[in-house]
Image (tube, rainbow, N blue to C red):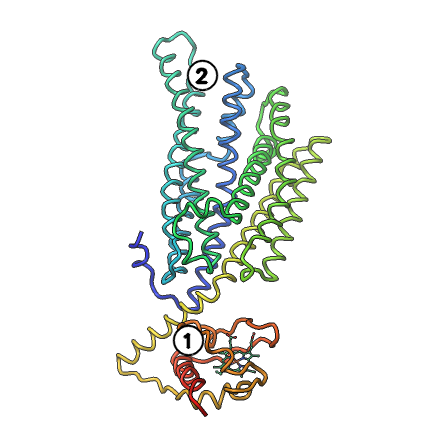
Amino acid sequence: MDFLKQLALPQSAAQIEVLHFVMNFVQILFLPFVSYLFGALTLSLYYGRKGRKRNDINALHFAKDVIDHVLPNKSILFLFGVVPYITLVFAYAQLLQGSESISVSILTWGAVFFMAGSAFASSYNSAFKLSSVLETIKQGNEEISVFRTELSEQKRTSGKYSLLFLFVGIFFLFAGTTLASEPTQWSSVTTVVELIFSAGVIVKFLQFVALSLTIATVGTLFFTFSWEGGKKNIAAEYAAFVKSATLPTALISILIQPLFVVLSVIVAPVAGLSGAVFVASVVGIFFLFLTSHYVYAMMKSFESKFAALAFYVLIISIVSVVIADTNSFAGATKKHSSFLAYQYDKHHEELLAAMGISLKVISGEEIFSAKCSACHEFGIKKVGPAYKDVLPKYENDRAKLLSFVLNPQKMDPAFPPMPNQGLKPAEADSIAAYIMRMYKAPK
Ligand code: HEC
């Protein structure tokens, strides 16, 4: 997947902001849809099998309906599934360029599996549509009954493969994005196998499975009883079947989710945690509880408006969790982002210089006395630490020192945070060279 690395272009700080925004937006489309699809497939396969075994018309009808709601046409799968996934791969390729992380390769493979899963899902759905057309033709025709058997075979295999490939595609998505949020692991994780057993990935995937059952059940209630006034002419017996097949699963799958939200905050990389992440997670849990409240209300006394409320509130909850997640990624990769922005600015300045537009660069010594000496001394601690105590760790990593000077991060709890000095990359370059040279020089 090296071609993606070559496609990645240097990004300015502003472009990185835009990429984070795009990632947020794309996941807000992707996650609700894909979790609904995954949950609907699971329910459809389960009830389809049950229906065939017991010759239960309601179960078979239900198996067709759940999948039909989420895939009313083929372009939905493309617009809300395939396109967002590919966009995410490109966004990650841009943001992780120059790092050793294998995230982007994992995500690229994930996209391939995901596309295969989508194709099978589409074939599963069209087999259902065709067989319900066949049902309107009267029995007895030899050819039609052969065709019918073939169709039900196609349904079974495409359904199974769809679930399997989507499973792998989505698992790889979580593996790739979780690794992307843990810069400390970038160089040590070299195969996807190591991620299969990582707590972060497992928690996220289980959370996804629980969520997918919630949204597929709540979504089915919504599309059966509420959307556009509810389905016309549903038999009372089928309505009762839908309720009993969805409500208990909805309630249980909602109630275990706050646990996963909390767990995922616990296993998230500390660098990514911020006020925004907590607020978004708390908002997410609050709306989940509200969803469970409406589901419970439907169990007590069914009203179709509760189905709509539960569905909308659940979508808000998912959006909050997505925002918490992307914020945590942006926080965790701040250092890498500021390094990329630094490279971009440097590249830009070199370009200007090559065109003969010179930028006056002040010497390191001048910058030191103008901008650093108020708080720093080489040998003694002032407002900030003595350089001789903090610089040795940058001896082999000048890039890290540069990104600190350009964008100071909280380092040592014994000191207040260092304010950003607003240096240009070229200035940061010369001050870094100056202090690295001077702190060793005998006074
Ligand atoms: C207003 C005070 C102030 C100014 C001005 C200031 N610093 Fe700092 N600096 C600090 C403080 C406080 C810390 C400790 C931050 C921490 O540990 O979170 C620090 C820490 C550092 C560190 C150590 C980072 C580490 O890895 O622990 C370096 C290097 C540094 N500053 C370089 C500079 C340079 C170069 C300048 C001038 C361009 C500068 N500082 C200007 C207050 C200042």
As drawn, 401 above or below 309: below
Q: Disc 1 beta carbon < 8 A from ligand 1?
A: no
Disc 2: which residue: 135
The kind of residue on which mark 1 rests is Glu
Instruction: Choose mark 1 or mark 2, whichever is in front.
Output: 1
Disc 1: which residue: 395
In this rendered view, identify the residue nearer to me: 363 or 358: 363
| Mark closest to the chain's N terminus, 1 or 2 | 2
Residue 388 x/y as whole percent: 49, 82
Secondary structure at badge 1 equals: loop
Residue found 43% across the figure and 64% down from its top: 16
For residue 320, side relative to residue 435 (left or right): right
Residue 73 x/y as whole percent: 43, 35
As drawn, 265 above or below 61: below
Q: Quadrant of residue 399?
A: bottom left
In this rendered view, identify the residue nearer to me: 166 or 19: 166
Residue 116 x/y as whole percent: 37, 37
The kind of residue on which mark 2 rests is Glu
Q: Quadrant of residue 431?
A: bottom left
Looking at this rendering, what residue extends furthest in the front direction? Answer: 442
As drawn, 49 above or below 184: above
Give the CA separation, mark 1 to mark 2: 76 Å
Residue found 26% across the figure and 79% down from its top: 354
Q: Are marks 1 and 2 in contact (CB under 8 Å)?
A: no
For residue 2, side relative to residue 193 (left or right): left
In this rendered view, identify the residue nearer to me: 82 or 340: 340
Secondary structure at badge 2 equals: helix
